[in-house]
Every structure is written in C-alpha cells, then in structure tokens.
Amino acid sequence: MLRILSEAVKAWSFDFPPYHLTDFEDSLGGAWYVSPTQHALELVILVPIFTGLTLYFGNRAWGKHTGAYKLLNSKHAVPEASVLERILLVLMVGSFGITCAHKAVTQTLLFLMQPCHASALLLIIVMMWPFKQYQLIPRLLLNIYYYTLWGAILALVFPDLRDHDMLGEVFNFFLEHSLILILPMYLISNPRYVTLPPSLDMALFSFFLYAFYHSPVLHLFSLWSGYNLNYSLVPPALGFLIQAGPSYRYIMYTAALLNMFWTRYLVMETYHTLVQRMRQQRKLKSC
C-alpha cells in the first residue's frame, strides 16, 4: 500500500532531483529531500487531522453559540479612517504591487501564495473591506492574523534573501515584512476594528487553519510545480533544520503551534493593554 501511494505521488509530482542533490543555495526549487512515501503519508494522515480540527476548534472559537460570534457580527459606528491608516494602506498596496511585479518578471507568481504575501493581501482586504457588508469576514481574518504574524517576525530575524537579485527586491522584502508586522499593531487598538480577547480555542483554530493552508494547499502546489513553497519540500538554510533531515517539517509544525501563543498572548496582548492604558491616562489628564 505504501509503495502504491509513493508511486502515485511521484508520478503526479514534478521531476525532482534525488535527496543527495538538494541545492541549499537555491530557495526556489525543490528536491526529493522528503521521500515520496513520507509526502504520501503526510497527505493521507495529516490532511484529515488538520481539516477536522480546524472545523472543531473553529466551532468552539467563533461558532454561533459563542460570544465571539456576537462580537464579530456586532454593529457599531465606525469612524473614518485616519490619515495614518490611509498612508499605511497605500504603502501596503504599493509594496504588494512591487512584489507581484517582481514575481511576474521572474515567472514565480506562484510564490505569491507564500504566507507572508498572503498576509499582505489579507491586510489589504481587511482595510479596504466595506464595513456595511458581511462584517464577520474581515473581522475574523484580522483576529486570525493576530495569532499568525509571528511569520513576519521570523522573516525579519532570519531573512531568506537567496534569489532576491532584482533591483529593489531586498528593500521591498524588508518593507513588506515590516508593514505586515506594523499594521496589525496599529489595527488592534483602532476603534474601526473589532478585537476578540485571546483564547485557547482561537489559538488552536488559527494553528490548524494555518497548518491546513500548508498541507494540503501549499504542499500539493509544491509537488506539482516543483517550487519550494513555504519550505514544503526542502528546509530553509538553517543548520539545525538541515540536520533534522526529512523530519524538519515536524519541527516547523511544532514551532508554529507554540508561536501562535506567544504572538497573541505576549506580543499583541501586551501591546494592546499598554495602548489602552496610555489612552486612559490621557483622558484622565484632560479631565
């Protein structure tokens, strides 16, 4: 049975070089660093788990019976966007547009599916969404992102600049990742947007949704196209992940789960609390 699954994955996939020819100087292409058998097992076992737990924790976190659902659908007066918010939106749109141009020229548009680029598009959608229509969608997307913005932090701490050779590409890399970190810090304390209190169910829902986006979505696109989307095929050029061999993916899943918690509970909640206290102090001083 395993052999049949392995052969099916290999027949459907791109013609990758073997494990021992993995090129860690190349951030775009993949290899059979993870065997076809392991890819098949992950798709057969992990995908149903990710799907089921995403639905389960989604219902627990913001199902119709929850206070979060009521808050996500609440109606209140929405103030006009500030000049600063409009400037940030223009910068985000401009940076994402430059990224699209770079990918189009290099014929790597599929890399727009990378989580950080998807995050940029998510924030653009949230900020441009007409508030009077289906308010739950942008509010939910933004509150999910509060758990997953650790990706922007790690990208800035460990920037993968291999194959960033075009004019302005490195600068735009740091601009885009800085914006997808700065924008949620601004939006979480903005009265135009609804912020859900952090919760275990929401953290787990965000993780399993993120994991589902990685596999099967990015996983299958990587196998089909030959591109190493979100390191689905080959680990980043970090020593400890390379030393982990084909098991590196499980380390990344575990790290992603833990990152959901410190990002939302420590970084975002601490910042949100500090901003609220500063506003309260200003009000008291003005009285």
Image (tube, rainbow, N blue to C red):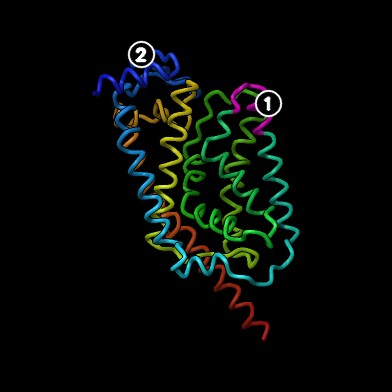
Residue at x 52%, y 44% (from the top left corner): 152
Element marked by disc 2: loop
Q: Left of 172 or right of it: where is 119?
A: left
Residue at x 49%, y 45% (from the top left corner): 153
Tell me the amino acid under the disc marked 1: Leu
The front one of 8 and 210 is: 8
Q: Position of residue 218 (x, y in %)?
A: 47, 33
Q: Position of residue 239 (x, y in %)?
A: 35, 29
* Residue 20 drawn in magenta: no
Mark 2 residue crowding within 10 angstroms, few (<14) / some (14–19) / many (20+): few
The front one of 97 and 78 is: 78
> From the image, which quarter does the N terminus lie in?
top left
Mark 1 residue crowding within 10 angstroms, few (<14) / some (14–19) / many (20+): few
36 to 265, vertically: above or below: above
Q: Which residues are magenta?
A: 99-109
Front: mark 1 or 2: 2
Residue that label 2 marks: 18
207 to 24, vertically: above or below: below
Q: Left of 83 or right of it: where is 251?
A: left
> From the image, which quarter does the C terminus lie in?
bottom right
Residue that label 1 marks: 167
Q: Quadrant of residue 107?
A: top right
Residue at x 41%, y 59% (from the top left corner): 59
* Residue 105 drawn in magenta: yes
Residue at x 46%, y 26% (from the top left corner): 222
Q: Separation of disc 1 and disc 2 at Cα?
A: 33 Å
Q: Main secondary structure of the magenta part?
A: helix
